[in-house]
Image: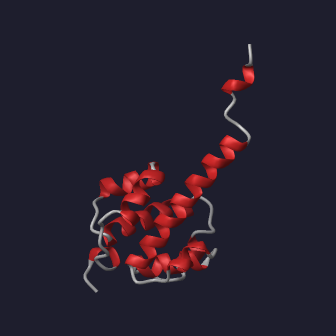
Amino acid sequence: MNYYSYYLGGPTAIFIVVVIFVIMIVSMWRVFTKAGKPGWACIVPIYNIIELLEIIGKPIWWILLLFIPFVNIVFIIWIYNMLSKSFGKSEGFTVGLILLPIIFLPILGLGNAEYKGPAGKKP
């Protein structure tokens, strides 16, 4: 009996990870462009967080709070909540962004969600 036929590793696992990675980048790219920011900003480290903070209407110094252990968890959840409100979604959508980002981020970026301004206020 061939035990390796049940092994989901090597090239298959790499392919799955790459597909998920591409879906997440395309989704964030669309979120940024819907909010009027350059799409390429989502792939630049640190700069993407600065742009995300501008999308949700929070000050740039919040980036420092994301480097403090345990405090960063609270602020990441808060950022996700403000992001969902910026696109007219509810707190239930925030829970989805936190628990299943591979599903809810494409809904936000590739779906018909429209940017409503920082935290849902019209610009």
Q: Please give left or right for residue 78 compared with residue 9 in the image.
A: left
Quick one: 31 or 86, which is closer to the camera? 31
Left-right relation of 14 to 41:
right
Tell me which residue sits at (38%, 77%) in the image: 34
Q: Quadrant of residue 67?
A: bottom right
- Determine the image quadrant of residue 91: bottom left
Q: Is 12 rendered above or below residue 69? A: above
From the top left corner, tell me how far across and down residue 19 is, in percent.
58, 53
Taking the image as shown, residue 121 lies to the left or right of residue 81, namely left
Is residue 81 visible in the rendered image? The answer is no
- Residue, x 42% and y 59% (percent of image)? 106
Question: Which quadrant of the figure contains the C terminus?
Answer: bottom left
Please name whichever residue, 32 or 110, is drawn nearer the observer in this view of the structure: 110
Residue 104 image-quadrant placement = bottom left
Residue 117 visible within the image? yes
Marks counted in the figure total 0
Residue occupying the point 28% across, 74% down: 120
Q: Residue lying furthest top in this view?
A: 1
**Residue 93, image x and y in percent?**
33, 56
- Position of residue 116 relative to residue 103, above or below, is below
Residue 16, x across and y down, in percent: 61, 47
User: Residue 98: image x %, image y %?
Assistant: 45, 54
